[in-house]
Image (cartoon, grey):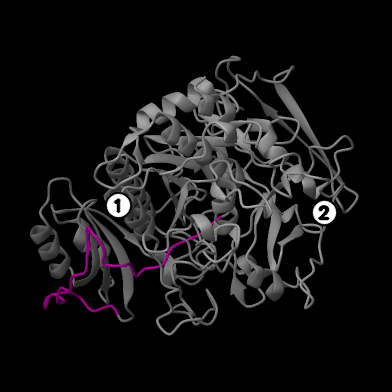
Amino acid sequence: MRKYVAGAAVVALSAVALLLVSTGAGAAAGGSEKEFVVLYAAGASSDSAHAAIKAAGGTVRSENTEVGVATVTTTNSNFAAQATAARAIDGVAQNRVIGRAPADAIAGGEIKKSDPATADLAGAKASHHSGKPGKHEEPLADLQWDMKQIGATASGSQKYEQGKGVRVGIIDTGVDGNHPDIAPNFDRKLSRNFTTDIPVDANGDDVDGPCEHPSCKDPADEDDDGHGTHVASEIASPVNHLGIAGVAPRATIVNLRAGQDSGFFFLQPSVDALTYAGDHGIDVVNMSYYVDPWLFNCADNPADSPQDQAEQRTVITAMQRALDYAHRHGVTLVSAAGNGATDYTKTIIDASSPDFASEPGEAAYPRTIPPSCISMPSEGNHVIAVSSTGISKRKAYYSDYGNGYIDVSAPGGDVYDTPDNTRDVTKAILAAYPERLGRESGAIDDAGNPTTPSVVKDCRGGTCAYYQYLQGTSMASPHATGVAALAIGRWGLRDFRNGGKFQFPDVVELLMRRTATDTPCPTPPAFTYTRHLPTGATVTATHTCEGTTDNNGFYGDGILNALKISRGF
């Protein structure tokens, strides 16, 4: 699961009403301006919340009335304490875009989130290239072992259902709506960007890099990271005799960008993307991220300061309100389980949070994490958490797991799932790659040819498109989202309000679970992964699978089955 974080400014759309409230005269001055996300108490009116914010010296910059959160700026150093003392306010979280990323996250002058699953792709070799496609297959179908694993092929699910009329929201870093293998299914009019790029933070550190647009707000058809484009392609690349086909090749792609170029996701844009999805007829959303800066949000962890405890409670409550809102409005919610190779149902140690500090000198620190702590959105109510499988159907070495945490599983790639436990990039997942990013990074040369086995080119006539291999639960989740789109397409009702199809999220989840292929725990259930690293070192790790064949901690209710759900069981 690739990490991302969203910016402070949001679009005034639907329930997101833009307001300005003057600073209270009695507020204590604190110097530099800071930004907070303020959570209203349940049942509190906007007027009472505005009054409390004003009294604490805050100015409301944007507000989501459906969830009851506002982005607030203030120079009052005591704002959080004063605001939370008011009955109308339930919590305050500092918006971390003004903060500082850890030094080890800064590379080449830009802050970029790292991920162990992604890091293992660098320099990996390819075992083979595409052969001839089969009848009615896309040119690169031979490289899509993932689609074969779940039956999402020309001779499989595509014969019965392709997701026409289903709207899929991509809550990610953006989507390259001009990619030739995405453009036919991309809805530019409905797409939105809920983030604003941050050239430098309050400390003068480079965050997103120089703004490419005067407003520092990218258009809703742009992706400066590549992650969101890959996710969208897995779900709904069309059957157009170019490159690959997605799980639901006739579904509509809607970009709901909540992640910044730097690879971070913050609270407010995540909340706004979810409520927008609920208000605009989005049928299913994919969420391959967690809300920064805390991988796990704990209500009362003794390792955390009272301020950090309050912030984490705010993240839990605000995100759950947004998830509930989207669910009530017909949105099926799908999330990546995570790439930490940990059992979420056990007490673990996490040393990665906070991954974006609010003050100079603040850094991540080790915390004991009991199962009561919550990673958002994957552990939220109504969310389908997806673990990752490799080509052999084993749980991927990086995938998080846990009996009672994982709902279903899907292919996400495992470059070490090879006979000799060495890396093979073709055991990752191939999907669309923005050409501009490839040329900027050197993965595509001046002549338009890939310079690495991780990138594949395909042309039809005068049109060429590029694809890259990625792995992670970020790649497993969109397979599940695509299967959800097939379920809605096959079993959905006519949506008289928004057009297209509609189906209740609980029904969609039930269909996904019932058609998934039961996959038992390995024998013995304590499975040891062996990886021969490029450095010559050998690394082993043992993960224990708990549960039954019908439902267990590695696979949940099983590996998803696109063919079965499309043809009607």
Residue 521, by quadrant, is top right
Residue 400 position, x and y percent, is 60, 37
Q: Give the numbered dot on residue 201.
A: none
**Residue at the image point whose x is 77% and y is 29% from the top:** 528
Q: Position of residue 47 (x, y in %)?
A: 8, 61
Give amino acid for label 2: Ala
Left or right of 112 in this view: 504: left
User: In the structure shown, which secondary structural element does the residue marked by tag 2 occupy?
Assistant: loop
Mark seen at residue 280: 1
Which secondary structure is most common in the magenta stretch?
Answer: loop
Judge whether residue 514 is colored magenta: no
Q: Looking at the image, how many numbered discs can be counted on the residues?
A: 2
Name above or below for residue 153 compared with residue 63.
Answer: above
Report the residue marked by disc 2: 124
User: Mark 1 belongs to which amino acid?
Assistant: His
Q: Nearer the viewer, residue 121 or 108?
A: 121
What whole-number distance in Å separates the C-alpha atoms at marks 1 and 2?
Answer: 42 Å
Residue 375: horizontal and vertical position, in percent?
Answer: 46, 43
